[in-house]
């Protein structure tokens, strides 16, 4: 059996999970409106995509770390050993780590905005959960040497920064789409 990993596995996983969460959005739309349904399903999909991008082995990509060279502790060197370029995203790997969490932060806020009062609890709790998710990813990268990833505290900072930027974008999107107006119509 071929090893799961690399770009093909990431793209296939994103496509399959996107189809699944698209169906979830369709099922939710009648109950909560299309904006909230798309945001909630999109948030769940973005969390799955984050896992695919960060936890699948990097086969055939120059960034993969050999399992026998895997460190036994997380790098606390802020700025870390991130390479200066990444083939799919211009800039640095740090930029990619930040950008990866922006959709989750934006969709979290947009999904919660339908219930304005509850959003005051859901959004901070959701951002804390995204931060914990980032920490969990780094721990998994440290513990599972076979995925060829390195644990780095800088990644957590970049991920949380992306989620916060996304939350600010989500506030803007909530003002544009006003999900609290998309109520279920009687009938």
Image (spheres, helix red, strand yellow):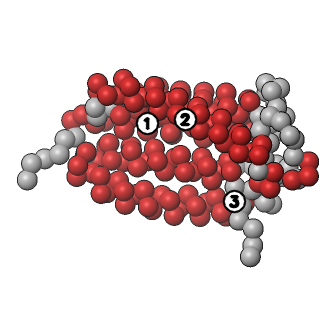
Please report the residue visible at 29 percent of the width from the left and 24 percent of the height from the top: 117
Q: Residues within 10 Å of mark 1 (few under 14, many from 20)?
A: many
The residue that mark 3 highlights is 7
Name the residue at 87% across, 46% down: 70
Say whether residue 31 is left or right of residue 75.
left
Residue reaching furthest to the right: 69
> Which badge, 3 or 1, comes first in the chain's sequence?
3
Spatial CA distance of label 3 from label 1 is 26 Å
Local secondary structure at mark 2: helix
Is residue 2 among what the camera can see?
yes
The residue pinned by badge 2 equals 130
Residue 158 lies, in percent from the top left, at 66, 30
Sequence-first tag of 3 and 2: 3
The reply to whether residue 85 is in sight is no
Residue at horizontal 22 percent and vertical 52 percent from the top: 30
Mark toward the viewer: 1 or 2: 2
**Relative to residue 150, is residue 45 drawn left or right?**
left
Q: CA distance from mark 1 to mark 2?
A: 10 Å
- Secondary structure under tag 3 reads helix
* Most distant residue in the bottom direction: 1
C-alpha distance separating marks 3 and 2: 24 Å
Q: Can you give x and y, in whole percent of width and height, for residue 72 in the image?
A: 86, 40
Asked if the residue under mark 2 is in contact with the one under mark 1, i.e. CB atoms within 8 Å, the reply is yes
Figure disc tally = 3
Circle 1 — which element?
Answer: helix
Quickly name the residue at label 1. Answer: 108
Q: Residue at x 77, y 54 (%)?
A: 147
Image quarter (top left, top right, bottom left or bottom right) of the N terminus: bottom right
Q: Is residue 132 above or below residue 66?
A: above
Q: Nearer the viewer, mark 3 or mark 1?
A: 1
Left or right: 55 as drawn, with respect to 108? right
């Amino acid at each position: 059996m071929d090893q799961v990993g690399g770009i093909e596995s990431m793209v296939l996983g994103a496509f399959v999970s996107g189809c699944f969460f698209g169906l979830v959005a369709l099922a939710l739309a009648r109950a909560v409106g299309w904006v909230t349904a798309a945001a909630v399903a999109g948030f769940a999909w973005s969390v799955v995509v984050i896992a695919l991008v960060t936890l699948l082995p990097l086969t055939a990509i120059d960034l993969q770390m050999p399992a026998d060279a895997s460190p036994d502790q997380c790098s606390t060197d802020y700025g870390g050993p991130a390479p200066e370029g990444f083939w799919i995203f211009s800039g640095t790997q740090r930029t990619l780590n930040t950008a990866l969490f922006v959709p989750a932060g934006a969709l979290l806020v947009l999904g919660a905005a339908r219930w304005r009062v509850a959003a005051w609890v859901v959004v901070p709790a959701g951002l804390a959960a995204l931060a914990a998710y980032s920490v969990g990813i780094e721990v998994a990268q440290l513990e599972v040497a076979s995925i060829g990833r390195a644990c780095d505290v800088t990644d957590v900072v970049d991920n949380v920064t992306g989620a916060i930027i996304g939350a600010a974008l989500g506030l803007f999107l909530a003002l544009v789409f006003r999900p609290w107006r998309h109520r279920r119509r009687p009938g």
